[in-house]
C-alpha cells in the first residue's frame, strides 16, 4: 500500500521505510508551506494537508519532531530544525544546544514525534510518540541525524547515533509514533468482501473442480461405472477447492512483505485473520476425507498435494506448481480407487496422460507469469492462460466422451464441466476488478 509522506528529508524517509516495511513510502515535499503552529501536531497537520489534495483516495502522512530539553524550558521544541537560525543546519544546532547547556546539572530531555494522517476518505488522525533520555556533554556516533549524537536514551549508555537502525527504531519517538500510526491504518482499513475475494482469486475457483472431474473420468473410463460414487466425487471436488484456497492464503502470508497490490501487504487483511483462515482451509479437506470415508489412495494424494503447495509457496518453482495441478487431477482418480494396485493398464495410461497435460500446461503458465508484477504487459495473456484451463479440462472430458462409450457418469461430468465454463465467464464479467492473476 502506498503511503505519501510530506517531507524532503531522505534520512527521515529511510527511517520510516525501515519501521513500516509493509508500505511503499513516497516522499512529497510540501515546499512553500510555513510551519506556524507552536505545537508539533499542529505543524504536522499543516504539512499533511498541503499534500493530501494532490493524492485523493490515498493515505497521506506528515510528522513534526523535535527535541525538548527541561533546563531550556522545552526548547528547541518545534524550532528544533532551525534552532541556530538556518533550517537543517545540524552542526550549528548541536553546537548551540551544547553552549546553552554549559554548566547545567539537569540535562534531561525527550524527543517528541507527532504524526498526522489523512485517510483515503479525507478523515484526519493523529499519533504521538516520545523517547526520554538526557543530553550528553559532547557528541558521539555517526549514525542517525539531527540531534542523535547528543541524545542518550533512558537505560542506555550510548547515543542514538551509536545505535543500529534496528535498536534506535525500537525505542525512538518516531518508531513509537509510527507503530501507533500503523495501528490506526489497520483499524481504518477494514477488510471488505472485495478484499477477501481478491485474496482467494475468486474468479479462478472454477478452474479447480475440472481437474478432479478429468481424473475421475479417466478412472471411470478405465475401471467401469460401478466404481463411480457421485457423493465421493463431489466431496473430493470440495476438498480440492479448499486445498486451493489454503494454498492461495498461504502464498500471500509467505509473501506478505514482498508482494505488491495484494490484500495482506496492502493492509486490507491482517496477518492474524489470514492465518486463521489458512488453518480453516487446512482442516476442511481433512474433515471431508474423514466424513465421506475417502479411500487411502486419496489420503496419500491429498497429503502429497498439501506438501507440494507448501513447497511451491516457499520456492516459487513452476514445476512444483505444475505438480500441484497434476496431483489435483490424480485426486479425482484416487477417489474412485479402493486400493493402491493398478490392475488396469488403461487406467495407468489415461491417468498418466491427463495428469501430464495439466502438469505441462500449468508449469508453463506459472513460468510465464513469474515476473508479471515487473512486466504488467503480461497480465492480459496470463488471465487468458488461466481461463484456458477450464477449456482444456472440458476438451479432455469431451475427448473421453468421443473416444470411449458414453456413460451416465460421463454425461454428469460433461454437464458439470460446461457449468464450470459458464461460471468462469460469468464471474469474469461480474468481477472485473477482482484480479485473476
Image (tube, grey):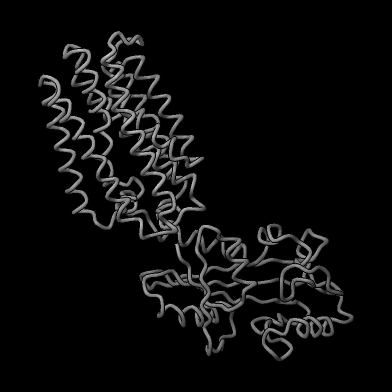
Which quarter of the figure has residue 38? bottom right
- Residue occupying the point 65% across, 67% down: 173
Compared to 165, does 52 lie above or below?
below
Q: Position of residue 313 (x, y in %)?
A: 47, 40
Which quarter of the figure has residue 152? bottom right
Considering depth in this image, is 254 or 43 the residue closer to the camera?
254
Q: Position of residue 74 (x, y in %)?
A: 71, 80
Considering depth in this image, is 311 or 80 the residue closer to the camera?
311
371 lies left or right of 132? left
Compared to 266, does 349 lie above or below?
above
Compared to 30, does 22 lie above or below?
above
Considering depth in this image, is 401 or 301 the residue closer to the camera?
401
53 lies left or right of 25? left
- Residue occupying the point 46% across, 72% down: 60
Quadrant containing the N terminus in the rendered view: bottom left
303 lies left or right of 328? right
Q: Position of residue 418 (x, y in %)?
A: 14, 37
Which quarter of the figure has residue 238? top left
Considering depth in this image, is 284 or 99 the residue closer to the camera?
284
Q: Position of residue 429 (x, y in %)?
A: 18, 54
- Residue occupying the point 32% across, 11% down: 342
Amino acid at each position: 500500500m502506498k503511503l505519501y509522506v510530506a517531507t524532503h528529508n531522505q534520512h527521515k524517509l529511510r527511517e520510516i521505510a525501515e519501521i513500516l516495511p509493509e508500505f511503499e513510502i513516497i516522499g512529497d515535499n510540501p515546499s512553500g508551506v510555513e510551519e506556524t503552529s507552536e505545537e508539533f501536531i499542529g505543524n504536522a497537520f499543516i504539512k499533511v494537508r498541503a499534500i493530501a489534495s494532490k493524492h485523493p483516495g490515498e493515505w497521506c502522512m506528515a510528522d513534526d519532531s523535535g527535541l525538548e530539553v527541561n533546563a531550556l524550558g522545552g526548547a528547541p521544541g518545534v524550532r528544533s530544525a532551525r534552532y541556530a537560525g538556518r533550517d537543517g543546519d545540524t552542526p550549528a544546532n548541536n553546537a548551540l544546544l551544547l553552549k546553552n547547556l554549559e554548566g547545567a546539572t539537569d540535562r534531561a530531555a525527550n524527543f517528541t514525534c507527532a504524526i498526522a494522517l489523512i485517510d483515503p476518505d479525507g478523515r484526519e488522525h493523529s499519533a504521538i510518540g516520545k523517547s526520554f533520555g538526557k543530553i550528553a556533554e559532547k557528541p558521539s556516533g555517526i549514525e542517525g541525524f539531527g540531534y542523535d549524537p547528543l541524545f542518550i536514551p533512558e537505560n542506555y549508555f550510548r547515543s542514538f547515533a551509536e545505535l543500529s537502525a534496528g535498536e534506535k527504531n525500537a525505542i525512538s519517538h518516531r518508531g513509537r509514533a509510527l507503530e501507533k500510526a500503523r495501528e490506526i491504518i489497520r483499524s481504518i482499513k477494514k477488510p471488505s468482501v472485495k478484499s477477501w475475494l481478491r485474496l482467494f482469486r475468486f474468479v479462478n475457483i472454477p478452474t479447480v473442480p475440472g481437474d478432479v472431474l478429468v481424473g475421475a473420468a479417466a478412472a471411470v473410463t478405465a475401471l467401469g461405472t460401478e466404481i463411480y460414487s457421485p457423493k465421493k466425487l463431489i466431496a473430493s471436488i470440495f476438498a480440492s477447492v479448499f486445498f486451493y484456497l489454503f494454498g492461495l492464503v498461504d502464498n500471500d502470508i509467505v509473501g506478505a512483505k514482498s508482494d505488491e497490490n495484494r490484500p495482506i501487504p496492502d493492509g486490507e487483511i491482517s496477518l492474524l485473520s489470514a492465518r486463521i483462515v489458512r488453518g480453516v482451509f487446512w482442516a476442511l479437506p481433512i474433515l471431508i476425507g474423514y466424513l465421506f470415508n475417502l479411500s487411502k489412495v486419496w489420503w496419500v494424494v491429498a497429503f502429497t498435494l498439501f506438501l507440494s503447495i507448501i513447497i511451491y509457496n516457499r520456492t516459487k518453482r513452476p514445476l512444483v506448481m505444475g505438480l500441484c495441478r497434476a496431483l489435483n487431477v490424480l485426486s479425482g482418480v484416487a477417489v474412485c480407487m479402493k486400493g493402491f494396485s493398478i490392475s488396469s493398464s488403461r487406467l495407468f495410461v489415461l491417468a498418466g496422460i491427463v495428469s501430464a497435460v495439466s502438469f505441462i500446461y500449468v508449469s508453463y503458465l506459472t513460468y510465464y507469469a513469474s515476473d508479471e508484477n515487473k512486466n504488467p504487459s503480461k497480465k492480459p495473456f496470463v488471465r487468458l492462460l488461466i481461463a484456458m484451463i477450464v477449456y482444456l479440462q472440458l476438451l479432455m472430458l469431451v475427448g473421453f466422451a468421443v473416444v470411449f462409450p458414453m456413460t451416465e457418469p460421463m454425461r454428469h461430468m460433461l454437464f458439470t464441466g460446461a457449468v464450470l465454463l459458464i461460471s468462469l465467464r460469468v464471474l469474469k464479467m461480474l468481477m472485473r476488478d477482482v484480479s485473476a492473476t
